[in-house]
Image (cartoon, grey):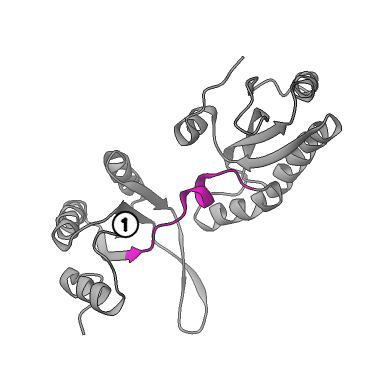
Amino acid sequence: MSDMRFDIDALFVHMTKNLGHDLSDEKEWTFTLRSANFASLQQVADDLQDEFVMQLQETVEEYDSAGKCTLGRPMLSVVKRAALSASEVKEIVKRVESIAKELGFDYEGVHCYDPVDDEEIFGWIVPADAGWRLRNMTDCGLDENAELPWSFLIQSQNLTSFKKISAELDSNDFTDRDDYDEPDENGNFATCVFVLGRNNERELDAMAERIANIADRLGGLLEGVQFYSRVQLFEVFGLDGAD
């Protein structure tokens, strides 16, 4: 039987004949490289980031047949989200294999997935669920207590509450923020608070509770949490701060 991680023609036959895949539908195509040299993988990720989504893991959990977990070598996933033909997939494979051969990496083939909901991954996280995202980051190789930007979205239903919350945030030294004094389509006013945090769930929960208490007392609501700097927030949501 063909190994469809490497046999692209067999993969497309399986997808179209057995899974009913429509070639005009987008898929997430993931081409995987492994190496003990994390720095070299990082350099490749930097070189390709304008063309692909790069997912770099410093350590990878691997399980044997008995369920025993060990930490495997670093892994780089080169991801392309598009409706690709077999020939287009082969062209990407050719590039990735060439990089692997040149740098001594192992090419572990291509996998195809249904597209991930960007809103689910990149959108604002319900505060109660933010800890789960941190745990996922840790599982993907982020060191515990590693420096990490935190951002908190507060929504106010009227301008009076918005101004009171802004003043209270100032008095509590939450001065690194963007205030949006124009209502959105639902009539809400938004405040984004930026904090230089860490990969520490207890500290994150404490900070979220502190900010939520300020919002609640003054008629607002801590709507969401994310792990974005101001620049990243702009790149994801296209938001630019207002004074």
Q: Secondary structure at mark 1?
A: loop
Q: Name the residue rendered at 31%, 65% in the picture.
A: 111
Q: Is residue 102 visible?
A: yes
Q: Is residue 222 magenta?
A: no
Give the residue type at disc 1.
Glu
Residue extending farthest top: 243
Pick the front one: 42 or 14: 14
Indicate the quadrant where residue 29 lies.
bottom left
Q: Is residue 118 magenta?
A: yes
Pick the front one: 223 or 203: 223
Compared to residue 241, the image places residue 109 above or below, namely below
User: What quarter of the picture does the C terminus occupy?
Assistant: top right
Give the class, few, some or many, for how many residues have Cα within 10 Å of label 1's Cα (few <14, many ≥20). Answer: some
Q: Position of residue 220 (x, y in %)?
A: 77, 33
Compared to residue 225, the image places residue 10 above or below, namely below
Q: Image check: 205 left or right of 54?
A: right
Give the residues in magenta: 112-125
User: What quarter of the picture does the N terminus occupy?
Assistant: bottom left
Q: Position of residue 108 (x, y in %)?
A: 28, 65
Q: Name the residue rendered at 17%, 63% in the picture.
A: 86
Compared to residue 104, the image places residue 182 above or below, namely above
Q: Name the residue rendered at 79%, 25% in the picture.
A: 161
Q: Is residue 32 visible?
A: no
Q: Image check: 79 left or right of 135?
A: left
Q: Image check: 221 left or right of 110?
A: right
Indicate the quadrant where residue 42 lies.
top left
Indicate the quadrant where residue 105 lies.
bottom left
Q: Position of residue 123 (x, y in %)?
A: 54, 44
Q: Position of residue 95 (x, y in %)?
A: 17, 52
**Residue position marked by numbered label 1 in the rendering:** 26
